[in-house]
């Protein structure tokens, strides 16, 4: 999009000045959730979430301090992703975790009809953030949700069923940088229970992912 906001604060100003988007925006006195990373010089993979929106406090929003609440002592948001990471040879020390949309909204990802509009505004900021750490755009991004994957794929690249990436129907699980809007290699790495990695459930996917990251 033209005249894209350049910083998270620019994005928030843009959203809160938009009559449609500001209705779904959930304001907070707290800072936006920060990205998680042990060491930016030792990143083997980026992990990308959709957004921090949740209603985990009896229907009320829990304002997470870090993406997926990593390091907060409440591991329910990232627990299954971490299990999957370990099965392909990665751990917390190897990754940089961020959300595509960094602000909270009043609707969770799956049911949010405005999600793509928010994502469109945040995309340039996310790309700049990743490119600052990886200027050659070679470090792969693990995509944790179908909605993110569909949003990022270039037109015409999403015709194959996602299941094909987890089976032998796709020889490669990595989508090249020229085929997606993030302009770096991306890999479907969904946190949905159906895609939970186990050695007897998705062995082909695990082996292909290990070749990328080990």
Image (cartoon, helix red, strand yellow):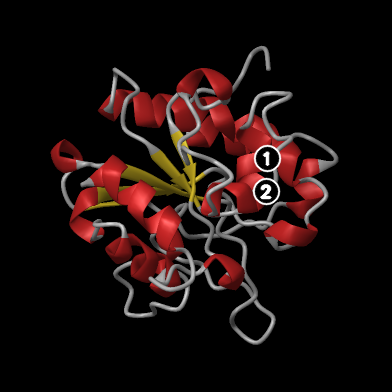
**Residue 150's disc number:** 1
**Outermost residue, bottom side:** 58
Decide if residue 35 is in sight here.
no
Q: Residues within 10 Å of mark 2 (few under 14, many from 20)?
A: some
Residue 157 lies in quadrant: top right
Q: Quadrant of the N terminus?
A: top right
Residue 205 lies in quadrant: bottom left
Residue displayed at 43% across by 72% down: 80
Measuring from the top left, give residue 52's x and y in whole percent: 55, 59
Q: Work out whether 19 lies above or below 85.
A: above
Residue displayed at 53% across by 25% down: 124
Lateral position of residue 198 relative to residue 169, left or right: left
Decide if residue 155 is in sight here.
yes
Residue closer to the observer: 178 or 162:
162
Q: Secondary structure at mark 1?
A: helix
Residue displayed at 67% across by 37% down: 151
Q: Work out whether 84 lies above or below 3.
A: below
Q: Secondary structure at mark 2?
A: helix
Please name the residue that numbered disc 2 is placed on.
Answer: 147
Q: Residues within 10 Å of mark 1 (few under 14, many from 20)?
A: some
């Amino acid at each position: 999009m033209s005249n894209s906001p350049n910083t998270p604060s620019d994005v928030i100003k843009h959203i809160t000045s938009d009559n449609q988007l500001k209705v779904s925006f959930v304001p907070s006195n707290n800072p936006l959730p920060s990205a998680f990373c042990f060491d930016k010089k030792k990143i083997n993979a980026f992990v990308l979430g959709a957004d921090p929106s949740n209603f985990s406090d009896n229907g009320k929003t829990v304002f997470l301090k870090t993406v997926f609440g990593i390091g907060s002592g409440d591991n329910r948001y990232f627990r299954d992703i971490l299990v999957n990471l370990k099965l392909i040879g990665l751990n917390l020390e190897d990754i940089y975790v961020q959300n595509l949309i960094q602000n909270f909204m009043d609707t969770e990802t799956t049911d949010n009809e405005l999600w793509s509009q928010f994502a469109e505004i945040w995309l340039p900021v996310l790309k700049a953030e990743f490119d600052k750490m990886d200027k050659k755009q070679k470090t792969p991004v693990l995509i944790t949700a179908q909605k993110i994957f569909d949003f990022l794929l270039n037109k015409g690249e999403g015709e194959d069923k996602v299941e094909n990436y987890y089976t032998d129907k796709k020889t490669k699980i990595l989508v090249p940088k020229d085929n997606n809007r993030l302009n770096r290699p991306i890999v479907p790495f969904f946190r949905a229970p159906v895609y939970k990695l186990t050695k007897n459930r998705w062995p082909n996917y695990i082996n292909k992912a290990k070749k990328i990251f080990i």
